């Protein structure tokens, strides 16, 4: 069985996200085990420090990864790819 880990930054305030995770976790349960990890997001109080805070969040994410674990990253500023 494949293990898939979803690491997100900050708790989601949107109920549809948790609902979707639960839905797909159930659909994929025959083939994969889904694990949800949430790391605490850094509060951006000063835009000039935003890059430093994003780097800290990235380090927290990397700390949760295994040594040779494959990674897929979703970025809100990334390129949109259609299915």
Image (tube, rainbow, N blue to C red):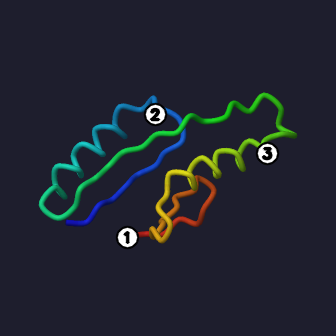
Write the residue at 37% across / 70% down.
Answer: 83
Write the residue at 58% across / 66% down.
Answer: 79
**Could you say which disc has been placed on residue 71 in the image?**
none
Place of residue 15 in the rendered image (x, y in percent of width and height, measured from the top left): 35, 31
Q: Earlier in the sequence, mark 2 or mark 1?
A: 2
Closest to the observer, 32 or 15: 32
Closest to the observer, 41 or 12: 41
How many C-alpha atoms fall within 10 Å of the one at disc 1: few (<14), some, or many (≥20)? few
Residue 6 as seen in the image, left or right of residue 31: right
- Above or below, comparing residue 68 to residue 77 in the picture: below
How many C-alpha atoms fall within 10 Å of the one at disc 2: few (<14), some, or many (≥20)? few
Q: Are marks 3 and 2 in contact (CB under 8 Å)?
A: no
Place of residue 42 in the rendered image (x, y in percent of width and height, measured from the top left): 66, 34
State how far apart marks 2 and 1 are (Cα). 24 Å
Most distant residue in the left direction: 30
**Secondary structure beneath label 3:** helix
State how far apart marks 3 and 2 are (Cα). 22 Å
Which residue was labeled with disc 3?
52
In which quadrant of the rendered image does the N terminus lie?
bottom left
Q: Earlier in the sequence, mark 3 or mark 1?
A: 3
Which residue was labeled with disc 1?
83
Write the residue at 48% across / 65% down.
Answer: 72
Place of residue 81 in the rendered image (x, y in percent of width and height, measured from the top left): 48, 69
């Amino acid at each position: 069985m494949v293990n898939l880990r979803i690491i997100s930054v900050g708790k989601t305030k949107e109920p549809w996200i948790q609902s979707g995770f639960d839905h797909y976790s159930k659909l994929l349960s025959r083939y994969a085990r889904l694990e949800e990890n949430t790391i605490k997001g850094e509060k951006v109080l000063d835009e000039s420090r935003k890059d430093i805070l994003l780097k800290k969040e990235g380090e927290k994410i990397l700390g949760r990864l295994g040594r040779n674990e494959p990674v897929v990253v979703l970025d809100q500023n990334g390129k949109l790819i259609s299915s």
